[in-house]
Image (spheres, grey):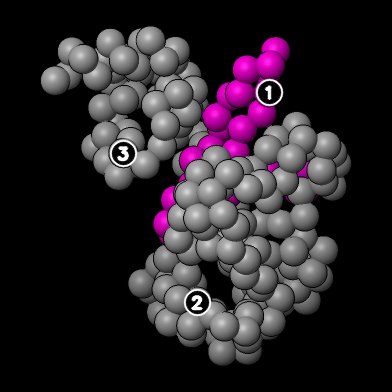
């Protein structure tokens, strides 16, 4: 964790734990977690993981933009978009330690906190606070993805785009339209027509 500002790490913990003092990690748990946290900076277009790799990290975006996608008949399908203050995770590969179908790509110069799977499992086995903390981390990502999937099933293409505009307006400006369309489960042509009608 050398080179990381303490305030940035505190902001990260607060983002996950919330404002309640009951949800805060003790000083001992914070130091244990900090000692295992890695920080890296990747350039736009670089990959943290490619298909066939085993996912070794739970990731959190300090600043920047991450896309998680997989290939379906040579088509890139965007599954997750994580920006400042959000986590991302390749669930199956991380928890099963099996080869992944997913790519994890930086869409901007990005700073990440990474939590190594084996070391964090050891922390969770020996510290209940940290175990609950990682449960909260995972819940945040799963709930975000469940919400997206539910919207794909029950909302129209236009409604899905309007929700994204309302909740994450900056994301629409930062992410290429082809990835936004894939993330929403629509074609680029459909997204273009929706944008035109909304002007």
When the figure is inspected, residue 37 is found, relative to residue 153, above or below; the finding is below
Residue occupying the far right of the picture: 98
In this rendering, would 33 be left or right of 63? right
Point out residue 196 in the picture as x, y percentages from the top left corner: 21, 15
Does residue 168 appear left or right of residue 124 in this picture?
Answer: left
Ranked by sequence position, the earlier of labels 2 and 1 is: 2
Q: How many marks?
A: 3
Q: Earlier in the sequence, mark 3 or mark 2?
A: 2
Q: Which residue is mark 1?
A: 71
Q: Nearer the viewer, mark 3 or mark 2?
A: 3
Residue 70 screen position, x and y as percent = 66, 28
Could you say whether the residue bearing mark 3 is in a helix, strand or loop? helix
Report the magenta residues as a range.
68-96
The quadrant in which residue 35 appears is: bottom right
In front: 198, or 154?
Answer: 198
Q: From the viewer's perspective, is the residue at label 2 or at label 1 nearer?
A: 1
Work out whether residue 171 or residue 22 is closer to the camera in this orientation and state it.
Answer: 171
Q: Is residue 40 visible?
A: yes
Which residue in the protein does label 2 denote? 9
Evaluate if marks 2 and 1 touch, with contact meaning CB atoms under 8 Å apart.
Answer: no
Measure the C-alpha gap from mark 3 to mark 2. Answer: 27 Å
Residue behind mark 3: 173
Quarter occupied by residue 58: bottom right
Q: Quadrant of the N terminus?
A: bottom right
Looking at the image, which residue is at 36% across and 10% down?
Answer: 190
| Disc 2 residue crowd, few under 14, some 14–19, many 20+, Cα 10 Å | some
Q: Secondary structure at mark 1?
A: strand
Local packing at callout 3 (Cα closer than 10 Å; few below 14, some 14-19, many 20+) is: few
Residue at 28% over, 21% down = 159
**Whole-percent x, y for residue 153 in the image:** 45, 17
Disc 3 to disc 1, how far (Cα)? 24 Å
């Amino acid at each position: 964790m050398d080179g990381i500002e303490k305030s940035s790490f505190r902001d990260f913990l607060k983002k996950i734990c919330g404002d309640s003092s009951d949800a805060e990690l003790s000083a001992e748990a914070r130091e244990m977690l900090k000692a295992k946290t890695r920080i890296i900076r990747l350039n736009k277009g670089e990959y943290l993981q490619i298909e066939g790799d085993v996912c070794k990290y739970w990731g959190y975006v300090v600043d920047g933009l991450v896309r998680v996608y997989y290939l379906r008949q040579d088509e890139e399908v965007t599954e997750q978009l994580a920006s400042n203050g959000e986590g991302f995770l390749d669930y199956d590969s991380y928890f099963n330690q099996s080869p992944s179908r997913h790519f994890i790509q930086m869409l901007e110069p990005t700073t990440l906190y990474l939590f190594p799977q084996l070391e964090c499992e050891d922390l969770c086995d020996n510290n209940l606070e940290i175990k609950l903390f990682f449960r909260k981390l995972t819940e945040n990502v799963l709930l975000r993805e469940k919400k997206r999937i539910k919207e794909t099933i029950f909302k129209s293409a236009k409604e899905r785009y309007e929700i994204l505009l309302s909740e994450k307006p900056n994301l629409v400006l930062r992410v290429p339209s082809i990835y936004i369309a894939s993330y929403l489960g629509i074609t680029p042509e459909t997204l273009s027509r929706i944008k035109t009608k909304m002007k």
